């Protein structure tokens, strides 16, 4: 009895304390209004889930389960800048699940995750907006699938399956309560992540006697100007990152759109802008321009799929580096995408 | 099944329940054998790769039977040599790499430890000091899932009786102590070892670059940091593993021998081996050192040279220990290094009293600076010897060039200097807390219990809390603020980061049990009749803390280092 009583009290204490932690983090979660909107690029999301967006896209999915249909933005870090909170679309909730470093494989995984989280009552009325540019179609692009999968499997809600797939380990009906139950761990993970960054700097200090460059604030980054020398450096980086456009990526885009439209939801492929100096400086942009009409044709042949060309919607001054729009410019993109989604203004069935 | 997996936790819980509720004798033997088999199978998830290992163990039992029947000296020697030869063949030492092997991939997980257990039985049964165990007892002893991966190397005569009868349920204090050990072990393996591994992985390329470019000053600093961190990493990884398996053993009614006894308090190299990997040291002492010394003594021994023959026996023993650790030449170098260390230590023990006189040597040993220097030199020597565990062939080749040697020697000297200073600082702070603050409030005779004890225990707890808070703040200040990492941050961010870092350090200190003595004393004073329940509540808190910390590290928990041996 001694053994049982002792174990029982210990287990109940641990469970009770954890329940208090869930309650506390849920209060924090609601206080930051995170439960209302999934917006991986927002500062609130940064504070709770980190800047890359992975954790928010995975663990804040309860915000997708609303009675209103969703407009869901999927893309990489440049699409993250298009904040969901800047949209004003009557009758729709808007979410941005874009993740820094995403390619098409990551976008496919993100669409899967969103798909299993949206409310069944909105099925057939949701709009998935896929933000692309020439980058995701390069041979080597998308660097975070492993990391995304690792975060997915971290707390046991998913496990690894064959061929880099991940399989949910709990019934779909338990997913949202489970996501709530692990909120305390997410807060700790965020704190620990900051401490790990500090620890790495400390390690640098121990090795080199210098803690390394001081992190520049995100807002300060938005005020950075790109001079000619910077542009050349960025172009060289981009050239090295993209040496070929891979037709397999167009096939993957088709698969993503197929998955979305199969459920009756709509898919909009948005061709995002990049600065003109970037487009002129890299050979693969021209290749992408040449190949995209043919490449997108399969994806756009699905019922409910359309194309929105925003390539010329911003000026060079609207970017703070080679791909990322400044906040004001991103707001303009939000309005254009919102309008196109509802009024179908500017949507086309080809990428010609 | 990894020790840090949720699967293992479930498996351990099931083992504890089964071994506690089923009766002793055949049921207990059969249950344990089933658990052993399941754990062994989980290492490969297939039967075929396990067959050579199982065959080795079965051959071991044949050797035990043969040893029992013959009981002749030369026959016993042949049996031991035969088992060692099969071990060498299965481990694919370079010596036998030309010999044919199985046509399929197979595992040798835990084989080194199985060899020690089997030889112990073969030799002792052969010499008549041990009765041949029943086959099922033998299998349970050799395959025991708690000791399979990395010991400890229990002795059969201590282990077997625990299989025959179900031991009585432990008291709540024993359960509490065991649960605390398991938690501490998990935090050591998953958190501390993970942090240390990350640091080691950052340092390795720097060390390599320093060797390649001949940057001696930078290389010395990196090498000292790397070897020091690796030693710490190995310690928390290995002794954390021991805490887990010994703790589970207590709960399951299988008492295992201790394998570590505060090795960082070692006075010298010989003392170190009575504190580090104790069961391996004891095995080698029983079966190798004693045999070598006896053999040398019989042939060359005189009253005056026995001490020197002892030094030779130590050298041989430690060279063998080095070779046992791995199959490549670098482990022979590791053995030579250990052998040299232990021999120098033994010779110093012989010569120093001759030079200084017995009382002079005794006085010297009692000097604080001598202890600190000796301890730092000992641990630093082990740290640089462990270079063999992680160095690549190219790095080893570069290390014997002039620049490399300078880095090697400079790193060792730097580590000794840093270790000596750290030892003085640590002991000074500890003594301050122990003598100045805690001692005056220790209960006087006849004053136990009641109000005064409650107040004293409360003050001790408060001071311990303050010590943990102070230590955490110092770590946070040194690691973040004094290094300039937070330069340019707003004061809010700076304070938040310092608070978070201090909080994380405090959580780690509490979860490894730094507050335990003070909490236990306060609990016993304040809740004399409900101590068990109070202990369970505290355990629940610590368990939650530890589980949270382990979950944070779940994607970066390092491999168990000794699993490779």
Image (cartoon, rainbow, N blue to C red):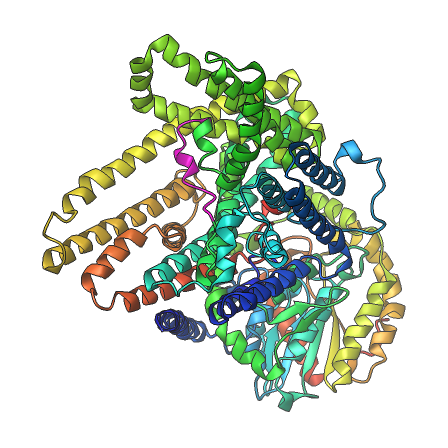
Above/below status of B171 relative to B265: below
Residue A207 visible to the viewer: no
Residue A308: x %, y % from top left: 75, 74
Residue B484 visible to the viewer: yes
Along the line of sight, which residue is nearer the eye, A348 or B222? B222
Span shown in magenta = B257-269
Left or right of B117 on screen, residue A248: right
Above/below status of A247 relative to B155: below
Along the line of sight, which residue is nearer the eye, B174 or B453? B174
Q: How many marks?
A: 0
Above/below status of B221 relative to A302: above
User: What is the quadrant of residue B4 in the picture?
Assistant: bottom right
Q: Is residue B260 magenta?
A: yes
Residue A340: x %, y % from top left: 70, 79
Along the line of sight, which residue is nearer the eye, B304 or B430? B304
Q: Residue furthest top?
A: B355
Point 54% across, 74% down: residue: A179
Along the line of sight, which residue is nearer the eye, B426 or B172? B172
Q: Is residue B171 magenta?
A: no
Above/below status of B475 relative to B191: above
Left or right of B191 on screen, residue A144: right
Q: Quadrant of the N terminus of chain B?
A: bottom right
Q: Quadrant of the C terminus of chain B?
A: top right
Q: Residue furthest bottom?
A: A121
Point 43% across, 39% down: residue: B484
User: What is the quadrant of residue B339 in the picture?
Assistant: top right
User: What is the quadrant of residue A128 in the picture?
Assistant: bottom right
Residue A270: x %, y % from top left: 74, 71
Residue A83: x %, y % from top left: 58, 69
Point 12% across, 47% down: residue: B444
Q: Main secondary structure of the magenta part?
A: loop
Left or right of B455 on screen, residue B149: right
């Amino acid at each position: 009895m001694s053994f049982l009583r002792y174990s029982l009290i210990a287990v109940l204490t641990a469970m009770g304390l954890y329940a208090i932690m869930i309650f506390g983090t849920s209060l924090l979660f609601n206080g930051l209004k995170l439960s209302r909107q999934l917006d991986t690029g927002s500062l609130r999301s940064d504070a709770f889930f980190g800047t890359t967006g992975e954790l928010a896209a995975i663990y804040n999915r309860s915000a997708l389960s609303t009675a209103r249909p969703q407009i869901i933005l999927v893309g990489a870090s440049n699409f993250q800048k298009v904040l969901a909170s800047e949209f004003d679309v009557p009758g729709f909730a808007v979410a941005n699940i874009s993740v820094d470093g995403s390619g098409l494989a990551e976008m496919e995984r993100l669409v899967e995750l969103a798909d299993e989280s949206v409310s069944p009552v909105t099925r057939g009325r949701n709009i998935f907006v896929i933000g692309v540019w020439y980058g995701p179609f390069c041979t080597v692009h998308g660097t975070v699938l492993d990391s995304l999968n690792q975060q997915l499997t971290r707390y046991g809600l998913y496990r690894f399956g064959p061929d880099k797939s991940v399989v949910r380990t709990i019934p779909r009906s338990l997913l949202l309560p489970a996501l709530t139950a692990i909120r305390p761990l997410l807060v700790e993970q965020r704190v620990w992540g900051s401490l790990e960054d500090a620890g790495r700097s400390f390690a640098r200090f121990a090795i080199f006697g210098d803690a390394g460059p001081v992190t520049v604030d995100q807002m300060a980054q938005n005020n950075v100007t790109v001079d000619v020398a910077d542009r050349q450096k960025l172009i060289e980086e981009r050239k090295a990152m993209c040496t070929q456009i891979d037709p397999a990526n167009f096939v993957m885009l088709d698969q993503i759109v197929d998955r979305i439209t199969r459920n009756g939801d709509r898919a909009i492929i948005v061709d995002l802008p990049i600065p003109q100096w970037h487009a002129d400086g890299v050979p693969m942009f021209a290749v992408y321009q040449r190949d995209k009409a043919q490449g997108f044709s399969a994806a756009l042949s699905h019922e409910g799929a359309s194309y929105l060309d925003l390539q010329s919607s911003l000026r060079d001054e609207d970017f703070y580096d080679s791909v990322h729009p400044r906040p004001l410019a991103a707001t303009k993109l939000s309005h254009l995408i919102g309008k196109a989604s509802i009024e179908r203004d500017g949507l086309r069935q080809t990428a010609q | 099944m990894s020790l840090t997996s949720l699967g293992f936790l479930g498996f351990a819980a099931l083992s504890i329940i089964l071994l506690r509720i089923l009766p002793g004798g055949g049921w207990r033997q059969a249950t344990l054998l089933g658990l052993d088999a399941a754990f062994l199978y989980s290492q490969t998830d297939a039967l075929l790769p396990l067959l050579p290992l199982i065959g080795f163990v079965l051959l071991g039992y044949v050797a035990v039977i043969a040893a029992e029947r013959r009981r002749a000296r030369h026959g016993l020697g042949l049996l031991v040599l035969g088992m060692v030869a099969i071990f060498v063949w299965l481990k694919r030492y370079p010596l036998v790499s030309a010999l044919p092997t199985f046509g399929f991939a197979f595992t040798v997980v835990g084989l080194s430890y199985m060899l020690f257990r089997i030889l112990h039985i073969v030799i002792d049964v052969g010499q008549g000091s041990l009765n041949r165990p029943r086959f099922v007892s033998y299998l349970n002893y050799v395959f025991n899932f708690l000791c399979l991966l990395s010991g400890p190397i229990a002795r059969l005569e201590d282990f077997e009786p625990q299989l025959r009868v179900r031991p009585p349920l432990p008291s709540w204090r024993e359960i509490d102590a065991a649960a605390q050990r398991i938690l501490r072990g998990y935090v050591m393996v998953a958190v501390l070892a993970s942090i240390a591994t990350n640091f080691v992985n950052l340092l390795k390329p720097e060390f390599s670059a320093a060797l390649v470019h001949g940057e001696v000053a930078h290389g010395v600093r990196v090498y000292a940091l790397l070897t020091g961190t690796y030693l710490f990493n190995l310690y928390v990884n290995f002794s954390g593993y021991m805490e887990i398996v010994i703790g589970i053993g207590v709960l399951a009614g299988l008492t295992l021998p201790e394998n570590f006894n505060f090795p960082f308090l070692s006075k010298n190299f010989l003392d170190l081996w009575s504190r580090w990997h104790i069961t391996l040291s004891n095995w080698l002492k029983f079966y190798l050192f004693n045999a070598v010394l006896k053999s040398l003594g019989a042939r060359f021994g005189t009253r005056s040279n026995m001490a020197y023959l002892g030094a030779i026996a130590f050298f041989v023993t430690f060279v063998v220990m080095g070779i046992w650790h791995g199959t490549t030449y670098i482990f022979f170098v590791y053995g030579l290094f250990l052998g040299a260390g232990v021999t120098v230590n033994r010779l110093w023990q012989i010569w120093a009293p001759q030079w200084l006189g017995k009382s002079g040597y005794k006085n010297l040993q009692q000097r604080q600076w001598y202890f600190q220097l000796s301890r730092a030199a000992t641990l630093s020597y082990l740290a640089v010897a462990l270079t063999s565990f992680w160095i690549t062939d190219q790095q080893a080749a570069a290390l014997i060039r002039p620049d490399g040697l300078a880095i090697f020697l400079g790193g060792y000297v730097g580590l000794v200097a840093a270790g000596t200073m750290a030892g003085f600082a640590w002991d000074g702070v500890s003594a301050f807390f122990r003598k100045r603050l805690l001692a005056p409030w220790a209960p006087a005779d006849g004053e136990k219990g009641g109000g005064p004890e409650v107040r004293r225990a409360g003050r001790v707890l408060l001071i311990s809390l303050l010590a943990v808070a102070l230590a955490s703040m110092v770590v946070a200040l040194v690691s973040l603020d004094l290094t300039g990492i937070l330069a340019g941050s707003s004061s809010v961010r700076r304070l938040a980061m310092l608070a978070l870092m201090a909080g994380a350090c405090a959580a780690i200190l509490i979860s490894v049990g730094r507050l335990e003595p003070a909490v236990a004393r306060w609990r016993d004073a304040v809740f004399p009749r409900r101590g068990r329940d109070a202990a369970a509540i505290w355990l629940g808190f610590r368990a939650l803390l530890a589980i949270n910390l382990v979950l944070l590290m779940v994607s970066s928990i390092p491999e168990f280092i000794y699993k490779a041996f």
